[in-house]
Amino acid sequence: MRAPVILIGAAMVVVAAAGCSTATTAPEVSSPVARGRAYYTTCQGCHGNAGEGFAGMKAPRLAGLPADYVAEQLLLYRKDLRGGPADFQGVQMNGRAKALPDEQAAHDVAAYIATLPAPPPVSDAAAKGGAGAALYESCAACHGGRGEGNAELGAPPLAGTDADYLARQLRNFKKGIRGREGDEKGQQMAAAAAVLPDEAAIDAVAAHASALR
Ligand code: HEC
Ligand code: HEC
């Protein structure tokens, strides 16, 4: 007869603790990650349930991206500093980012995305090396030797991200479609993209960066 008494006692302690915490702190449902998970239901049709990306929608992988970077991109889309009519794929994101109720929601959904485990990269490791490797030397200072990114510099990870998406971003940076006045980090990247001599160089460095591990 002792065990049930102890169990009931333990249960009462748990109930008492739970009652105590709801009285003093916000319930779990209003934590940033929990709110972000709810907002993410509006994203998963394109970016995938686990943020793995969906090439058919040209929507890149989000899992593995740091929260700060994701939040910043959402705010750029909200302010029309990224996307817009000249950006054929990116323009889809302006409405989505503006549909989030406020800036806090952008931070919340970014916090949720940062909890998604980065899936194994899908790109072809054979694309690594060659001309792309030589070109990538100028990128490593910011994006890291293994394409792991550098949070301090705001340079996102590139390893494992769809090569077509990376190449499209490089073209956007070169053309000034991304990295506009008011987007300081994007402008740094635009300067880095400007040194890529031609289309073949863009494709080669994108393939190499995507295949990094
Ligand atoms: C209709 C499809 C669609 C929906 C829905 C959508 N996205 Fe996107 N998203 C895209 C596409 C396409 C791109 C790539 C744009 C480009 O190529 O420049 C993108 C790009 C992004 C990027 C930039 C990634 C990077 O590496 O810079 C982020 C961040 C993002 N989306 C987050 C979200 C979030 C959060 C939501 C939900 C609130 C969402 N998206 C909803 C299609 C979508
Ligand atoms: C001076 C530092 C720096 C250098 C050098 C640099 N980058 Fe970047 N890169 C950045 C920053 C910062 C961002 C984020 C820009 C933003 O917030 O919009 C970025 C963003 C990117 C993106 C967009 C990623 C995404 O998820 O949308 C790509 C692609 C990229 N860089 C590729 C390269 C390549 C390839 C090179 C070499 C040719 C390179 N970068 C060199 C700093 C750098």
Image (spheres, grey):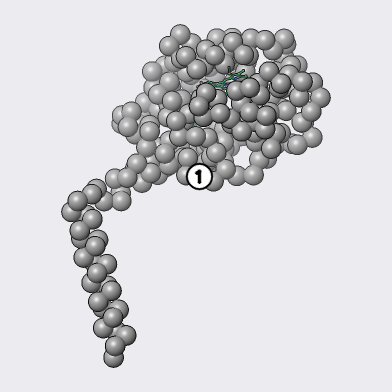
Q: Which amino acid does label 1 sit on?
A: Leu
113 or 23, which is in the foreground? Answer: 23
Quarter of the rendering containing residue 142: top right
130 or 80, which is in the foreground? Answer: 130
- Binning the other alpha carbons within 10 Å of mark 1 as few (below 14), some (14 to 19) or many (20 upward) gives some
Q: Look at 20% across and 58% down and name the residue there.
A: 20
- The location of residue 194, given as percent across then percent down, is 64, 9
Q: Mark 1 points at which residue?
A: 116
Quarter of the rendering containing residue 59: top right
As drawn, is 145 to the left or to the right of 30? right
Relative to 17, does residue 166 appear above or below in the rendering? above
Q: Can residue 12 be seen in this view?
A: yes
| Ligand 2 rendered quadrant | top right
As drawn, is 122 to the left or to the right of 179? right
Relative to 119, does residue 172 appear above or below in the rendering? above
- The location of residue 210, given as percent across then percent down, is 68, 31
Q: Look at 52% across and 23% down and name the residue there.
A: 153
Instruction: Report how many numbered discs are placed on residues in the image.
Output: 1
- The location of residue 166, given as percent across then percent down, is 63, 25
Q: Look at 28% across and 74% down and name the residue there.
A: 10
Relative to 134, does residue 26 appear above or below in the rendering? below
- Kindly give the residue lying farthest to the bottom in the view shown: 1
